[in-house]
Image (spheres, rainbow, N blue to C red):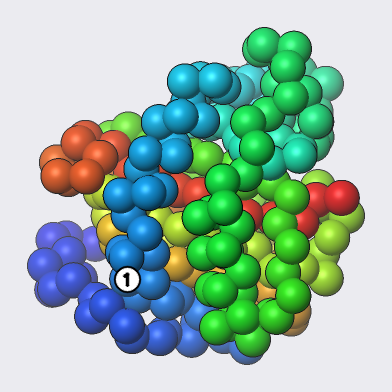
Amino acid sequence: MTASLFDEVPPMPGRREELCEGAVILRGYALADEALILAAVRDIAANAPFRHLITPGGFRMSVAMTNCGTLGWVSDRSGYRYDAIDPDSGRPWPPMPGVFRQLAQKAATEARFPGFEPDVCLVNRYEPGARLTLHQDRNERGVAAPIVSVSLGLPAVFLFGGLRRSDKTQRMQLTHGDVAVWGGPARMRYHGIAPLKAGYHPSTGANRLNLTFRRAA
Ligand code: SIN
Ligand code: FE2
């Protein structure tokens, strides 16, 4: 797809875009908390630095990751898992800041998933070219709970597929402050992020940040 209206017209904050039953993008929903979120990400990264995990197949992930919460998502040669301990430091992950939990709960409720109690926030940092191939979030015991995903900084193309990997994908632009929520009948849909286009954002510089809230235990 070439640069087009798709890249040039930012979605209107406050807009609610349903992707399918159980999945919605809340445009600009995190904007009011931007400063607190960015400060919290800096604190988290000071204690549990971003790292490029190795997949079970032996590849280095292009997205740099860290976590906060009682559990964190990790990957290594032995597989994907949730772990209460950061394997790099041997210490628990930093606690989930109140502003994170409240934002995730509010967004889930707005998307008609009240009572969301996330125990994991995976923090993803994308540099130009970084991508996340189509996958399902399925290491969580709590699949009754939705996924709440907050985007900050450079825009990205969100690939939102079906329940089978081969299903057709929708391509949606996720921009600074957008919150995507998928749960219920959409909880196991395949999704991913297309390679990030280079650019500059006043809040995050040359990167995109994503916070993904889950109920893992
Ligand atoms: C994820 O699927 O874990 C992250 C999606 C995103 O970066 O928006
Ligand atoms: Fe995911």
Using the image as rendered, state which of residue 60 and residue 66 is in the foreground: 66
Judged from this view, the residue extending furthest toward the top is: 89
Q: Amino acid at mark 1?
A: Gly
In the depicted structure, whether residue 48 falls above or below residue 14: above
Tag 1: Cα neighbours inside 10 Å, few (<14), some, or many (≥20)?
A: many
- Identify whether 10 is placed above or below 36: below
The answer to whether residue 181 of the structure is visible from this angle is yes
Q: Position of residue 44 (x, y in %)?
A: 51, 30
Percent from the top left, x then y, of residue 68?
A: 62, 37
**104 left or right of 151?**
right
Residue 59 is situated, as x and y percent measured from the top left of the image, at 60, 21
Is residue 4 in view?
no
Disc 1 target residue: 28
Q: Is residue 15 left or right of residue 94?
A: left
**Residue sitting at x 70%, y 80%:** 114
How many badges with numbers are in the image?
1
Q: Quadrant of the N terminus?
A: bottom left
Instruction: Please give the name of the residue rendered at 39% of the width and 56% of the height, measured from the top-left corner.
Output: 151
> Which x, y percent locates residue 53?
60, 23
Q: Please indicate whether residue 22 sits to the left or right of residue 103 in the image.
A: right
Q: In percent of the image, x 29 and y 58: which residue is there?
A: 176
Would you place residue 145 above or below residue 217 in this image? below
In depth, the one of 90 and 163 nearer the eye is 90
